[in-house]
């Protein structure tokens, strides 16, 4: 939800390209959520009972988001297992090919599912640090902000969220430029 709202606002309010990489939701669901957020939360489903005014707002939102996809301002990629190479290729293609080198905001939904090639050699925590270092370098090299989304661990629903609720929070605390709960 946060990811698709940021994408919608990036496109609608700032006319800034967005690249959404997801390990969890298929492209069609992400697209629907972006449409909903694009025009202030108009539900994509249930539009049959909507007033003509709401139907027209939804039609305009669908048209606008579809146009963003067609022009390349919005790219959505679904892979159950993202790798560092896939992320690099997606950014290269989205920024350089589709947007003529224009910077974009890159969002990765479910950072914990990014494949870590050295997990067996170093363990999950160290491999997570390596992955975060790689993405930090990639963001600097390609001059593009990369926003990672991650679930909190199961205990977070019982109390106010804290950094320690991030899965492998040490790596996120150490290498992220900012963490928002």
Image (tube, helix red, strand yellow):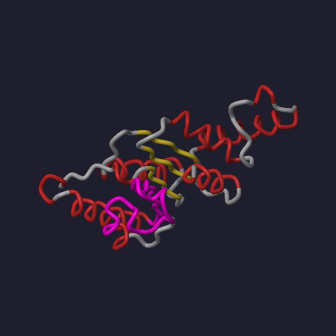
Is residue 10 shown above or below 49? below
For image coordinates 48% across by 58% down, the residue present is: 158
Decide whether residue 115 is among the magenta residues: no
- Residue 75 is left or right of residue 71, and the answer is left
Q: Residue 123's x, y, as percent?
A: 17, 58
Viewer-side residue, 34 vs 169: 169
- Residue 69 is left or right of residue 111, and the answer is right
Q: Residue 135's x, y, as percent?
A: 35, 62
Is residue 155 shown above or below 80? below
> Which residue is farthest top?
48
Q: Residue 131's x, y, as percent?
A: 29, 60
Magenta residues, start to end = 143-171
Quadrant of residue 35 within the rendered picture? top right
> Which residue is farthest right?
52
Decide whether residue 148 is among the magenta residues: yes
Viewer-side residue, 176 vs 87: 176
For image coordinates 77% across by 26% down, the residue present is: 48
Viewer-side residue, 64 vs 38: 38
For image coordinates 54% across by 59% down, the residue present is: 102
Quadrant of residue 66 within the rendered picture? top right
- Residue 168 is left or right of residue 36, and the answer is left
């Amino acid at each position: 939800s946060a990811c698709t709202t940021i994408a919608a606002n990036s496109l609608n309010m700032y006319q800034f390209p967005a690249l959404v990489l997801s390990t969890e939701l298929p492209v069609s669901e992400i697209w629907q959520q972006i449409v909903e957020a694009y025009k202030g939360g108009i539900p994509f489903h249930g539009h049959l009972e909507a007033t003509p005014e709401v139907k027209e707002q939804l039609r305009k939102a669908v048209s606008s988001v579809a146009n963003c996809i067609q022009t390349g301002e919005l790219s959505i990629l679904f892979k159950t297992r993202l790798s560092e190479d896939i992320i690099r290729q997606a950014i290269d293609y989205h920024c350089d090919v589709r947007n003529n080198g224009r910077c974009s905001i890159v969002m990765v939904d479910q950072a914990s599912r990014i494949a870590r090639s050295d997990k067996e050699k170093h363990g999950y925590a160290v491999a997570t640090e390596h992955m975060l270092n790689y993405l930090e370098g990639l963001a600097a090299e390609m001059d593009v902000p990369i926003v990672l989304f991650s679930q909190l661990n199961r205990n977070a629903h019982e109390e106010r969220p804290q950094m320690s609720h991030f899965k492998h929070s040490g790596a996120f605390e150490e290498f992220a430029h900012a963490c928002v709960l």
